[in-house]
Image (tube, rainbow, N blue to C red):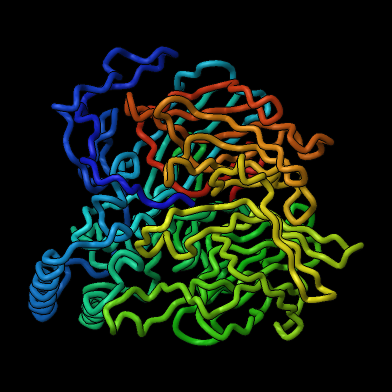
Amino acid sequence: MATASTSSSTIWANPNPRTTFSSSPKLPSSFSVPSRKKQKKISCALQSPSILQFPKQSPFQLPSSTPDSWNLLQKISAMALDAIENGLIEQEKKHALPKTADPKVQISGNFSPVPEQSVRHCLPVVGEIPEHVQGVYLRNGANPLFEPTSGHHLFDGDGMIYAVKFENGSASFACRHTETQRLVQERALGKPVFPKAIGELHGHSGIAKLLLFYARGLCGLVDHSQGIGVANAGLVYFNNRLLAMSEDDLPYEVRVTPTGDLKTVGRYNFDEQLKSTMIAHPKLDPVSGELFSLSYDVIQKPYLKYFRFSPDGTKSKDVAIDLAKPTMVHDFAITENFVVVPDHQVVFKMSEMITGGSPVVYDKEKVSRFGVLDKYADDGSSIKWVEVPDCFCFHLWNAWEEPETDEVVVIGSCMTPADSIFNENNEELKSVLSEIRLNLKTGKSTRRAIISPENDVNLEAGMVNKNLLGRKSKYAYLAIAEPWPKVSGFAKVDLSTGETKKFIYGNQKYGGEPLFLPRDPNSETEDDGHILTFVHDEKTWKSELQIVNAITLQLEATVKLPSRVPYGFHGTFISANDLATQA
């Protein structure tokens, strides 16, 4: 997952809202970007014009409590709480924000938001879309609806899904906010009122904003009982449903319409089986069809729970995993028989807010470790912990078993400093692709950098062939996060030899997570398929979807997009056959 830009330069966008899009395979002359003199600063999706005419907002259901429905006492309470909040914001303005919470840094350049875009068909294509690319490519990202009033981290933005639908060599595009309870209520109120977990909740002002939020809840001005999440990080297609996720809430079900547009169905609790939050990186077993996931709690024990869903969506009971401290567990891994759970050094310490700090801290006294638990365990008592000192993997790419040596092999990117995404740090960030071996017999571990130091690059966000998840894979396809936090291309890495082949997007072109789409799930060649990724040209301020042959690393097709696509997070691909069976 990319983090926010470290550049504080002015945000610019195309101000021409009247440009229309031609169905011709050539771009119209009016598609050009005007000079920077005519461009204007943008800070939120409502201010951000698209290259095309900005369509009217899609219809949405109003929350039960809106300003028009408030009684006199509620209106007085709202005015009083707003005055307190405004005073708090004025006080905050007297102090400089850290880069990790400064919206001028976090949502600058192509990290800045865009408005929704209704579906546009017959997009211009350079080259030829491969015949097997039939279905829809979707990518999630953070796209704040309102301009931040104080601290804001990139991860705090409202979720928006960007979709390119392919059908017989033709492509369409749409992007829509996921209609979370948070977004729907804030839109009805006309301003942001839900606290931002990373950008705002630090120090005494963070405590004050939490108290203000719950005071609004007690007065009936907002309803936090239906979740406060942003659904901006992960996407998974499971049991005929597309689910958008962030680890602070339940998933949201989103439907892909026959035309290629997106429509939020609602918050999804698996038919009232899921009672807790769910991380944004569940694992879909390609053999069993089961979905495995975790949920962490920052307040009370158990701080971590593991559970799974059968292919028909039936949930197992929660398995409590005993952790001494509430710990950030953003990702995990599965093998054929086990789940592999990281317990690393980035922890939650709410008491730090009382002393003016961030609740997300690096615990230098803690020793990082991985837990290996049977996939079908009824409780967490049988988990085997293996220490891996000074290891923090924000993402894990794959894992598998090697029974001949009693080892579980884990592939991940080890990041230092561990908390640099969340807390300001002057040390250069490094993300090293690593092989971690956990010996279940001796309880010892080994770790090695897969790529030699002289050829090493920061690799963050990517995947292996999804048909080999939990099984030994030869290749990983990972974003080249350089210059950090931008992504200049992707690397195809041989996980055994370290041989690395790079595909660079081009001069001043940057992208995000590469998605590997197999040509055929039964293919004997692991890399037989294509890489799909959004790319943005910072010279022309236009975005495109590139389709690259995964064997030859040759660009085969470029889909020109009618709207800018900001740098974002994680994606998925739903085949045409699966689309036909949506719930």
Question: Relative to residue 67, is residue 337 drawn left or right?
Answer: right
Q: Quadrant of residue 369?
A: bottom right
Q: Residue furthest right?
A: 404
- Number of residue marks: 0
Q: 286 above or below 367?
A: above
Q: 388 above or below 476?
A: below
Question: Relative to residue 395, is residue 542 drawn left or right?
Answer: left
Q: Position of residue 339 (x, y in %)?
A: 71, 68
Q: Position of residue 180 (x, y in %)?
A: 38, 60
Who's the residue at 73% across and 58% down the image? Answer: 399
Who's the residue at 74% across and 35% down the image? Answer: 527
Q: 385 above or below 123?
A: below
Who's the residue at 62% across and 84% down the image? Answer: 322
Who's the residue at 26% across and 75% down the image? Answer: 206
The one of 313 and 307 positioned closer to us in this rendering: 307
Q: Position of residue 137 (x, y in %)?
A: 54, 38
Question: Relative to residue 425, is residue 253 drawn left or right?
Answer: right
The one of 396 and 164 positioned closer to us in this rendering: 396
The one of 474 and 257 positioned closer to us in this rendering: 474
Q: Residue furthest front?
A: 454
Does the rendering let one see residue 493?
A: yes
Q: Quadrant of residue 340?
A: bottom right
